[in-house]
Image (cartoon, coloured by chain):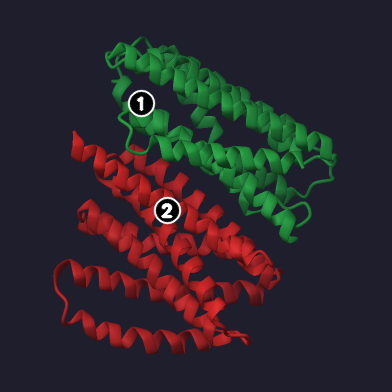
Chain colours: A red, B green
Amino acid sequence: MEATLLTLFIAIAIPMTMMLFVFKGKQRTVMAFLLIGFYVCLLAGAINSIVLKYGAYDKYYITVNIAPAAEEILKALPILFFAFVWKPERQLLLECSLAVGVGFAVLENAFFMANTSDLSLWFSVIRGFGAGMMHGICTLCVGYGITLIHTKRKLFYTGSMAILMTAIVFHSIYNVLIQSRYSVCGVVLPAVFFLILITSIKGKRKNYGKN
Amino acid sequence: MIYYITAICITACSLFLVWRLIGQKIPMYYKIPAGFVCCFALELLSCAVNEICGASFFGDPGVGAFGIFGGFCFLLSANYGQLDSLVDDGSDTARARRFALLAPALDAILIVVLLVGLDGEIALFNKIMFVVILLPILPASYFCLKHLLLPVDAFGFLRSSRLYNIAVLAVGVLFICYLRMQMSDGDLIKNIGTVLAAVSVFCLVLSCGKGVKIWKQLF
């Protein structure tokens, strides 16, 4: 498992690392966080393998109960570090959060594609929309909580924890659905949340624009 | 069936709240409790999905129970993160702070009596997990009682949020009972617990709406 993931990581990350030397400013930062997302996926894979090897749990139990918590915490760490040390502007932090989530989803999808026996268009659509949106939304929400780190410290402590827990539960629900015969629901669930989020944000911008 | 219907109702309620609240010009303090409703909806959905897909592990609270932990973190965020620094400047509040300790003390006693004092049918690890999940109720109830006892502030938050704070205190107690009911064997008790918890969440939302109305009248 780790060998496949490592191979994929090298194959995808090296060309993208070269782009880092060309890009500048915000683009470079976002690209770097996309790469960090790949790396976090590699790390999460390693942790899950260790738990599977030495823990008294089977693979299904780990994907439902342990992996969501481990993955969400790991994805939050680089964003937290970035926010704490560099104090970036809010929009950039949100973009970087999304990049970590999407980067994670890309490598995870590549791993599942490389390991599945029945590779089909439907499978790729399910993985693409489902995992892409789920990881993106979860990390974006956690990133939103982290944006409060320098402005509202008290709210940051409790709010980030609350959002992280929400993301973990949401991730767990997705993992259960995507592995069951109701995998379509696994795609619909993040899609609905994504649509509500986007529509609400657009509505908010419109309201602020009017006032 | 009752469980699934309750889960669907709460999920619909949470989606509606998110839809309505984002972009509205009301204080953040009154928006944050929507997060609690979302967390509760996710907890119910998680249990329902696990049951349908055969992913529930006997006697295990599951990761879905962290929805309750997150939910009470949201309620704590509203009172501690958003409101406390606005209404408590440290002067003349020592009495309220002392008396406010009564709420978490009573909750802690209830947790100990209901959960830890169970007979040996539940594993020790699960008992510890349930206590951990219920931990944010203690600071949340402390700040709610403290804000009930504090004198009225200039922003009108304390005056408008009285009913909401009482509702949070009641929800805290009900959720401790709700988790205890979920640990019992009978389906009927589990369903009653779920419906009671859902009703208490609806009451919390209504009290929050009432608070917004009073706050708008004041300003």
Front-lying residue, B163 or B22: B22
Kind of element beneath mark 2: helix
- Please give the chain letter of the residue carrying mark 1: B
The residue drawn where x is 85% and y is 39% is B186
- Please give the chain letter of the residue carrying mark 2: A
- Would you name the residue on which mark 1 appears? B84
The residue drawn where x is 31% and y is 87% is A14
- Would you name the residue on which mark 2 appears? A195
Left or right: A19 as drawn, with respect to B120 = left
State if disc 2 and disc 1 touch (CB < 8 Å): no
Where in the figure is residue A138, as x and y percent of width and height? 44, 57
Front-lying residue, A86 or A143: A143
Kind of element beneath mark 1: helix
Between marks 1 and 2 in the image, the one whose residue lies nearer the viewer: 2
Pick the quarter of the image with the C terminus of chain B.
top left
The residue drawn where x is 57% and y is 83% is A120
**B63 w.r.t. A16: above or below:** above
**Is residue A37 something one can see in this rendering?**
yes
Where in the figure is residue A161, as x and y percent of width and height? 45, 47
**B219 w.r.t. A78: above or below:** above
**Is residue B117 something one can see in this rendering?**
no
Where in the figure is residue B117, as x and y percent of width and height? 77, 35
The residue drawn where x is 55% and y is 33% is B137
Front-lying residue, A63 or B45: B45
- Asked whether the residues under marks 1 and 2 belong to the same chain, the reply is no
Which class describes the residues within 10 Å of circle 1: few (<14), some (14-19), or many (20+)? some
- Hey, what amino acid is under mark 2? Leu
- Hey, what amino acid is under mark 1? Asp
Which class describes the residues within 10 Å of circle 2: few (<14), some (14-19), or many (20+)? few
**B194 w.r.t. A68: above or below:** above
